[in-house]
Every structure is written in structure tokens, then in C-alpha cells.
Amino acid sequence: MATHTVRFVETGETLACNDRLTLLQAMERLGRKGIPVGCRNGGCGVCKVRVLEGSCERRVMSRAHVAIEEESAGYALACRIIPTSDLCVTVIGKMGRAFARPEQDRKLTGE
Ligand code: FES
């Protein structure tokens, strides 16, 4: 089992994701408030991200949420990708608020 590091550009945070987890499953393990639990099956679009660096296995996802052109530009649904290398990602969908500010700011405001 290989483990890859995923870095979020918004905060610089990293997490470990093994090759048996989707990116969303790994993100949920952060226990972060604001990570919505959607369909987990590529249909609702709440977990949209953009992979800026690295490679991943991509499973079928709704074209209503990730157009072919977007997929070519790195957009994906976190519940439908499994990292196959270290990744650098930006959070696009409703989860974006959970990654909008550094952790220390979040603690200061009591969120
Ligand atoms: S959780 Fe619904 S598309 Fe990812």
C-alpha cells in the first residue's frame, strides 16, 4: 500500500492519503468542520477540487459537475479520485470554506 501526500494550496496543509482511499475519504479524516458529506459517488458536485500537480486514478463522475474540458484542466470530484502520486490541489466546491483560511485563524474566531 502506497501513501501519498496531498497539499492544499489555500492553507498549505498536507494530509496523507493511501492508495485505498479516495481523496474525499482522506479529507474527511481531517475531522474538519465544513467538509460536506455528499453523495460520495460523483453525482452531487460538493467535493469539487482542481488537481494542480500530481496524478490520480479518476473514476466516473457526473459531467453536470465536471465537464470534459474541466477534467482536462485538472478539475475532479474528490470522491472519485485516488492519488497515485503526491498531489497539490485547490478546493473548488462547497468544501472551499473549510480550506479558506489557515487553521490558526479558524481557532481564533472559534469556528
Ligand atoms: S460527494 Fe457527491 S460528488 Fe463527491
Image (cartoon, rainbow, N blue to C red):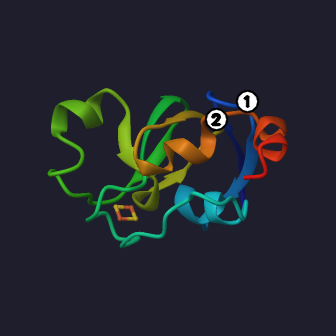
Placement of the N terminus among the 4 image quadrants: bottom right
Amino acid under disc 2: Phe
Report the Cα–Cα distance between label 1 and label 2: 5 Å
Q: Nearer the viewer, residue 74 or 96?
A: 96
Horizontal relation, residue 107 to residue 12: left or right: right
Location of residue 26 (image quadrant):
bottom right
Q: Secondary structure at mark 2?
A: strand
Q: Are marks 1 and 2 in contact (CB under 8 Å)?
A: yes
Q: Nearer the viewer, residue 24 or 111?
A: 111
The spot of residue 47 in percent (x, y) is: 42, 54
The residue at 60%/35% (across/down) is 100
- The tag on residue 8 is 2
- Label 2 within 8 A of ligand 1 by Cβ: no
Residue 76's x, y, as percent? 36, 45
Q: Where is mark 1, residue-wise?
A: 12
Residue 65, disc? none
